Image (tube, rainbow, N blue to C red):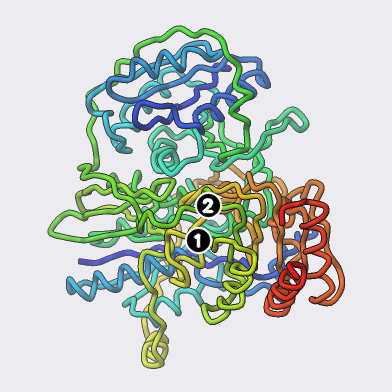
Amino acid sequence: MRIAVCIKQVPDTEARLRVAPDGRWIDEDELKFVINESDEYAMEEALSIAEKTGGEVVVFTVGPERAKEALRKALALGAVRAVHLVDDAYQGGDAAATARALAAAIRREDVGLVLTGSQSDDVGYGSTASMLAGHLGWPHAWLVMGLDVEDGSARVIREMEAGMNEIFRVSLPAVIEVQAGINHPRYASLKGIMRAKRKPVDTPSPGDLGLDPSALGAAGSQIEIVDVAFPDSGAGAEVLEGDPAAAAQALVEKLRNEARVL
Amino acid sequence: MSNQVWVILQHRDGKLHRSSREAIAAGQQLAAQIGGRASAVLLGSGVGDLAKEAAGFDLDAVHVADDGALAGYTPGAYVGALAPVIGASSPAYVVAPHTYQSVDFVARLSQTTGAAYVPEAISFEEVDGELLWKRPILTGKLHARVRVKAAGTVLVTVQSGAFSADSAAAGSAAVQDLAPAALTSDRELLGVEQVGSNEVDLTKADIIVSVGRGVGKPENLPPIEELAKELGADLGASRPVIDNGWLPRERQIGSSGQTVAPKLYLAVGLSGAIQHLVGMKGSTCVVAINKDPSAPIFGISKYAIVGDLHEVIPALTEAVRAAKG
């Protein structure tokens, strides 16, 4: 079985972030970019299924030139090839526009399963892959914490609120959106990194996929970001200054005598 | 285009989910904003009593699809029931709570109907004659204001706690039947399970020391455990710490873990993603210890120490010990 994994390259959310001068997004100039966290878990899930069932993993992404680094990492982990929707027309799209592009790229392949993360750590729409499933006419599941692929179907454990999971079966092909924590992602080996350099990366244009550029990317989106800002911190915290010992002492004093919680 | 607002109600075990009342409040406020009326939509099997409960809110109507295929939640049956009626009535907005169930089918409903989808909204405001939706981005570190460019129905899921359930206005609504088409489920439901053991109950803790990703590695936990012991506190954690296997899953606090409200909540190296905040924002006194002063956790904290937790934690343990004399 061929498994498609959709990944996204996102800013490292541990980094200090600044709003860009035009106010419409963050300043990306000095940011480090990484594979979206839940997509790394999807990659691991795909590789382990492919190993068990004798299949192969093909990795897909929508993103600018820099996203090639994320694809190289996925190839080093064990994907056999990559599809990079790098054309300008694909960029800056909402979930609906991105799902349309991915669906056209995946439809060209004989894919039995699509795996991806549940939510991106940048815009965080959490809906691209469910929309992708709609285009393909396949079942989907969001927030998946357990997956057993059997003949023609998959047993799925899906997270619900408050520490409960629901368990169900879907027919294959399907789109499975995994949660971080479903497995333990592997590291790339040196051999894998060397091999990745020779693995093919396909970059189909909208024309190659039979898509109208005006239905893609920012132009083809239904929603758009007007501006971004740090949240109002409300009253905000009282910051206790000084070296660690002084700050710690001041905190204990406040907790005892002001907040009266100690 | 109508000026109707529909609210999709979520329920479990014969009870309306708390988030459904928040969604009703959001729907009522949105209807007032656009000069329309809000109605509720209830999907399920044998949900007559729930429909009566929903009819006690100030709504135009409660539309009920009562069908055996809707007894258990599946996106196939939910989208199958909703898509045709949204297409036929073209409500201006369809609001649902931003829960693990709603997002699972609303994204799909958006693709099926072609309606735009604004996920995880926390507020709306009118600016120069257009409605802008605020939603968290970059794991809650920033907010974005989002505009809907597309014409037609807009689907919105509202974040837990963003609209007050208590502000949902009471009233009296007519219950109306929605006759859904033949519905097909796309999942064979096999059951539900509790995650991890039930052995750790953080909901009754007076003091919780909660650990975030900023702790870096499990080898850094012992000084934090020592502080917790000195405070007589229970240890909690945010999701990344659990996912990395540094602490067991029954210690997870947040939307997919436990919801807690201790007197004192000490957040250590924890940035405060929205999924975590919904699980602990009822705490009486929140203290943040973090090296990044722009972390969202500071916004809901009473006190904070900005600094390296590896230096601050031992100092704090020492200070607590000294104070106890």
At x 23%, y 36%, the residue is: B185
Q: Is residue A230 at all visible to an observer of this figure?
A: no
Residue type, label 2: Gly
Q: Chain of mark 1?
A: B
Residue A173: x percent and y percent?
23, 54
Please give left or right for residue A36 compared with residue A113 in the image. Answer: right
Quadrant in which the N terminus of chain A is drawn: bottom left
Residue assigned mark 2: B254
At x 52%, y 11%, the residue is: B60
Q: Chain of mark 2?
A: B
* Same chain letter for marks 2 and 1: yes
Classed neighbour count for the residue bearing mark 1: other residues with Cα under 10 Å, few (<14), some (14–19), many (≥20): many
At x 50%, y 51%, the residue is: A213
Secondary structure category for the residue under label 1:
helix
Residue B25: x percent and y percent?
59, 25
Residue assigned mark 1: B239
Residue B95: x percent and y percent?
52, 29
Real-space Cα separation, disc 2 to disc 1, in angstroms: 8 Å
